[in-house]
Image (cartoon, rainbow, N blue to C red):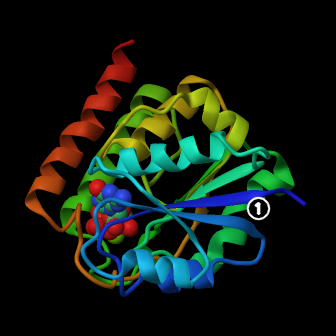
Amino acid sequence: MAEIKVIIPAVNEGDSIGKVVAELPNSVSEIIVVNNGSEDNTVENAKKAGATVLTENQRGYGYACLKGLDYVAKQSKQPDLIVFIDGDYSDYPEELDKVVAPILQDDVDFVVGARKKALREPGSMTPQQVFGNQLATFLMRLFFRAKFTDLGPFRAIKYEKLKELEMQDKTYGWTVEMQLKVLRKKMTYAEVPVRYKRRIGVSKVSGTVKGTIFAGIKILGWIFKYSLK
Ligand SMILES: Nc1nc2c(ncn2[C@@H]2O[C@H](COP(=O)(O)OP(=O)(O)O)[C@@H](O)[C@H]2O)c(=O)[nH]1
Ligand SMILES: [Mg+2]
């Protein structure tokens, strides 16, 4: 059986992180929650639910993901797949098996869980977020003929392929960087429709002005950087 590890960046997700960890299916061998200075019971609840909890001192979504990867790289046995999911309980953790299926069954390299409009709870994504994702995926289609329709956080990739990507983004550009590099390296990919609901707790990214502006800048920055190369 393929070995699957999950990385979850989490800041102040005490009310949701336990549910996310608990509802991930048994096909997962380790759940790694990367905390950045949470001031609530995120760490305690993640541990209680059975996750490995790491601490990253630098604030940032990308920093947290990189910390998780660094931890995995140092383990004696490497996984076959890495899955990323958010800690806010917006995604449906039990859909993990569906998200990894194209990799396990069809040998695809990378899968994005696409939050299709019909599968989204109203209000689960801000209008700016929907617009930003549409613009980003439109530009990826234009420049790379990409078939992505979302930059969703719930995603799976073969571990060996992820290493080849040499991920760098420390903050909000993490998801788009991964997709652009998959395209540039001509890896194979698929999208799986996933459901998405309103988060528990408070948004750190799309629900904040700073997050929205910087995410927009980061995402467009990566796209233009890669398109002009
Ligand atoms: N470790 C860590 N996690 C973060 C950071 N920023 C956001 N997150 C987590 O990343 C996930 C997505 O953030 P969220 O606030 O839901 O963003 P949104 O979905 O765009 O509103 C959640 O699990 C957050 O707790 C960060 O700086 N460090
Ligand atoms: Mg969220």
**Position of residue 147 measured from the top left corner of the image (x, y, whole percent):** 54, 44
For image coordinates 37% across by 52% down, the residue present is 56
- Indicate the quadrant where residue 168 lies: top left
For image coordinates 19% across by 39% down, the residue present is 217
Name the outermost residue toward the top: 229
For image coordinates 41% across by 26% down, the residue present is 143
**Position of residue 88 measured from the top left corner of the image (x, y, whole percent):** 38, 76
Which is nearer the eye, 163 or 157? 163
**Position of residue 118 measured from the top left corner of the image (x, y, whole percent):** 45, 77
Q: Is residue 67 above or below residue 14?
A: above
Write down which quadrant ligand 1 falls in.
bottom left
Residue 41 visible in this rendered orientation of the protein = yes
Residue under label 1:
101
Residue 92 visible in this rendered orientation of the protein = no
Secondary structure type for disc 1: helix
Name the outermost residue toward the right: 1
Q: Is mark 1 within 8 Å of ligand 2?
A: no
